[in-house]
Amino acid sequence: MSDHKAFSFVFSKIYSLYVQKAEKNSRTEAEVIQIICWLTGYNSNGLTNQIESENYLATFFAEAPTINSNVSLIKGVVCEVHVEDIEEPLMRKIRYLDKLIDELAKGKSMEKILRSL
């Protein structure tokens, strides 16, 4: 694993930015929580513990119960990079989450964001 700067960002700070972005676009914190739990397998208590622990993103993803099996359906561009082309596994997970929050802020339905088949 490389020492990318993003890996040492504190998850609780990123989480608050996600919530701000969602609320700015008339979405809710509950939807942000649903997306994060869908992606990582955390339940609401586990997510709350991660936020309160002020863990780094690397720790947040390392301790995630399970990454959703439908992540391969997440495609598109985040920060000018196609998420499906990112080779570093941790960075790919971070960008998956960024992409899902971007979709929420752009008004996509939760069914589409969560890749309901």
Image (spheres, helix red, strand yellow):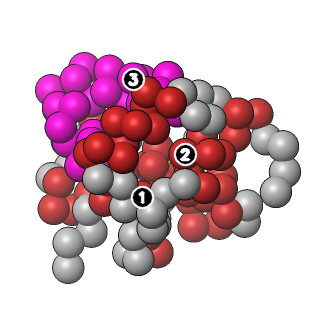
The answer to whether one can see residue 91 in this image is yes
Callout count: 3
Q: At 29% from the left edge and 43% from the top edge, which residue is drawn?
A: 45
Q: Earlier in the sequence, mark 1 or mark 2?
A: 1
Q: State left or right for residue 7 relative to residue 3.
A: left
Q: Which residue is mark 3?
A: 16
Disc 1 element: helix
Q: Are marks 1 and 2 in contact (CB under 8 Å)?
A: yes
Q: At 31% from the left edge and 27% from the top edge, which residue is drawn?
A: 19
Q: CA distance from mark 3 to mark 2?
A: 15 Å
Q: Amino acid at mark 1?
A: Thr
Q: CA distance from mark 3 to mark 1?
A: 17 Å
Q: At 27% from the left edge and 30% from the top edge, which residue is drawn?
A: 22
Q: State left or right for residue 112 relative to residue 62.
A: left
Q: Would you identify the image quadrant in which residue 101 lies? A: top left
Pinpoint residue 44: horizontal percent, then vertical percent. Answer: 26, 45
Q: CA distance from mark 1 to mark 2?
A: 9 Å
Q: Amino acid at mark 3?
A: Ser
Q: Which residue is mark 2?
A: 60
Based on the picture, tell me whether residue 18 belongs to the magenta stretch.
Answer: yes
Circle 1 Cα neighbour tier, 10 Å, few/some/many (<14 / 14–19 / ≥20): many
Dot label at residue 40: 1
Q: Earlier in the sequence, mark 3 or mark 2?
A: 3
Disc 3 element: helix
Q: Quadrant of the C terminus?
A: bottom left
Residue sitting nearer the eye, 82 or 37: 37
Q: At 29% from the left edge and 53% from the top edge, which residue is drawn?
A: 43
- The correct choice, above or below, for 108 with respect to 24 in the image is below
Which residues, given as a range, are shown in magenta?
Answer: 11-36
